[in-house]
Amino acid sequence: MKKFLNIFFVTLGVIFFIIILVAAYFYITDPLNLKPLIFGDETETVGASSSAETSNPTLSESQEKALDKFGIDPNDVPSEFTPEQEACFEAELGEDRVAEIKAGDSPTAIEYLKARDCI
C-alpha cells in the first residue's frame, strides 16, 4: 500500500509540475493573444480618441462613438457620399436601413462589415 501511495503522489506531483510549466509558457509567450482580453483597460485608453475632436459634421455623436468602437477614425469618413456609394450601401444594407442611418441611427458591427467595401 505504501508503494502505491508513493507512486500515486509522485505522479500527481509530476502532472502538477507539467501544468505549471505549460501555464508559465502560455503566460510568457502569449501565443493565443489573451493578454488584451485579461488586461483590456490598459490598451483601450492608449489609442482611444475623443469624439469631441472630430470635425465631421454629418455624423451624430452615437455614430462617432460606434466608429470609435470599430477602430475607425471618424475624421477619415467622408462627409459626402457619391451616388455610386449610396447605391452600394442600399444594395448591401437595404434602402430602409440606409435611410435610418442617414437620419442619425448608428450602424451595427455587422452592417459595417457588410458595407465597408462601399467606402
Image (cartoon, grey):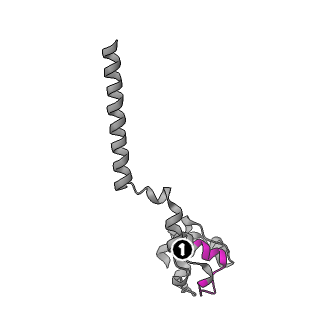
Is residue 28 among the parts visible in the rendering?
Answer: yes
Residue drawn at x 52%, y 77% is 88
Residue 105 rendering spot, x and y as whole percentages: 67, 73
Instruction: Name the residue that disc number 1 marks.
Output: 48
> Which of the pair 107/69 is nearer the observer?
69
Residue drawn at x 34%, y 55% is 29
Question: Regarding mark 1 in the picture, which secondary structure is present there?
Answer: loop
Q: Is residue 60 magenta?
A: yes
For the residue carrying disc 1, how many other residues have a C-alpha within 10 Å: few (<14), some (14-19), or many (20+)?
few
Using the rendered view, name the quadrant where residue 65 is placed: bottom right
Residue 86 rendering spot, x and y as whole percentages: 56, 80
Q: Is residue 49 magenta?
A: no
Instruction: Write the start and end of the magenta stretch as one range.
Output: 53-66
Using the rendered view, name the quadrant where residue 62 is placed: bottom right
Q: Is residue 110 above or below residue 32?
A: below
Q: Is residue 88 above or below residue 24?
A: below
Which amino acid does the dot numbered 1 rest on?
A: Ala
Residue 112 rendering spot, x and y as whole percentages: 54, 70
In the displayed structure image, the side of residue 4 where residue 69 appears, left or right: right
> Which of the pair 22/66 is nearer the observer?
22
